[in-house]
Amino acid sequence: MREYTAVARTGSLLVTIRPKENAAFLVIGSNRLAAARIFTALEASYTVYVAYQEQDIPDEEITHRINQGEITYVPLQDEHLIEVVSGVPSLEIVCVTDSLLTTINTRRRSYESCRQIAEYCASKRVHINVVDWTTLNDVSFPATHRWRTGSTAHSLQIAVNTFGKGCRLATRIKREIVSSLQAEIGKAVDNIALIRSKIIDLPLEEDDQLVSEPLNTPVAQYGSPRMTSSYFEDAEESRKRRMKWVAQVSEYWPIKTIGRLRESDIDRILNDFDDTTTPAIPTANPTPAISRSSSAQNLRTQTLHSLNITPPQTNDDEVSKPRVLLLGSGPGHPSLLTIAAHNALKSADLILADKLVPSAILALIPASKNLIIAKKFPGNAENAQTELQQLALDFLLTSTQERRPGTVVRLKQGDPFIYGRGGEEVLFFRSHGFEALVVPGISSALCAPLLCHIPVTQRGGQ
């Protein structure tokens, strides 16, 4: 019987709350933590009130937000504490910060005072958070980070929550998580949202329900009998097919690539996605064709020791011919990439990568290089393959015409000749006068069992 994860009832996070219209957030205190809570509440679209005694010296940010009319100041007297709390309209959350053990104000709110506020909030079904008295809390505030580009705040936020048991450590953990992620990650989320909004007219929170089958469930290819011009695809089927593509982009494309998409790029990709005609493979051959016999002879005389993938060099007497490398990226871990493949990725002029090449491999490619990832979304695998071949051929023909060297890399998962259409591409480029150089990669057929300590061959094995 399948085993499932045991439930640990320790207050795990479940939802993030969108405040009701005009919902109020009351901060009691005037210290730096109070200013931080106020900022977070404002960004969450709460109507914010702050209460502290008139003799207290508020944080400069609090004073600024009061003067700007962003928050409302409520004078506080402890003998009228409950009256102050009850006087806030549409109150949803109370945050007590002057209970903090270390504060710029010499007076710290007592446990008894905090308990009174908590009891009132419980009676009115108002959420409460009391700093340093966590037993009174029914909500906790995590250490959060929101990605921004200039003044633009993106949709993505992360939160690290220790339920009040290690707030300073939670902040440090948050910083380390943020520093380990790509700068484009916030924009990537917004770009995915933009793609989804262009595809479907459902609320964004609900569209994932359209895709219930596994991510890589086979679908009919464009150009197949089912997808001929006489085939009619209704709106619901179209949305489901498109959302499978969005799911695959989210799963496989590098964050950096998604984050750098412009709206014009997105429109072009969606137009390609809806194109039901397979691009014609070019027949023009402006360069002298290499005969099969001469190609075969060259391949027979080439040995492993003569493998040369350094960039083509030019001199006054000769212009090197551009070339195409069919490059295997191995099982996916950068440490298992061959030195030849690594060098090729750093020196290539154009890199055309299959969709399944892991982000860790693509991250090794310098940002200055021209990287294009195959649009092999459901139903478009054949079109995408043809498009990559066309891009590679265009590069080779243009470089030849301009009499300049250059290298285009077809980057594949594993080994180019195992499930990688490598043989097909060798024949394609050969038919247009270019002999592809194949750079082997470690095939998953070999590395998968080896990484699991299963020898592919074993002397004396039973």
Image (cartoon, rainbow, N blue to C red):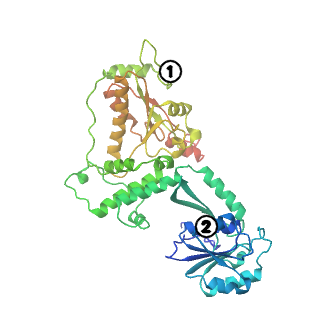
Residue 20: x and y in percent read 50, 76
Q: Examine the image and state in which quarter residue 293 appears.
A: top left
Instruction: Estimate how packed mark 1 is, as few (under 14), some (14 to 19) or many (20 or more) residues with alpha carbons within 10 Å.
Output: few
Quick one: 449 or 390, which is closer to the camera?
A: 390
The quarter in which the N terminus is drawn is bottom right
Toward the left, the furthest residue is 230
Question: Which tag is nearer the camera, tag 2 or tag 1?
Answer: 2
User: Can you say whether 294 is above or below 137 in the image?
Assistant: above
User: Can you say whether 332 is above or below 13 in the image?
Assistant: above
| Contact, mark 2 vs mark 1 (Cβ under 8 Å) | no
The quarter in which the C terminus is drawn is top right
Circle 1 sits on which residue? Answer: 306
Which callout, 2 or 1, points at the residue further toward the start of the chain?
A: 2
Give amino acid for label 2. Arg
26 relative to 370 in the view: left or right: right
On residue 23, the disc is: none
Residue 129: x and y in percent read 66, 75
Q: Is residue 353 visible?
A: no
- Residue visible at 53% across and 43% down? 332
Quick one: 305 or 285, which is closer to the camera?
A: 285
Toward the top, the furthest residue is 317
- Indicate the secondary structure of the residue bearing disc 1: helix
Circle 2 sits on which residue? Answer: 65
Measured in 3D between alpha carbons, the distance from the residue under mark 2 to the one under mark 1, in whole angstroms, is 71 Å
Give amino acid for label 1. Ser
Instruction: Estimate how packed mark 2 is, as few (under 14), some (14 to 19) or many (20 or more) residues with alpha carbons within 10 Å.
Output: some
Toward the front, the furthest residue is 67
- Residue visible at 39% across and 56% down? 195
User: Can you say whether 256 is above or below 206 in the image?
Assistant: above
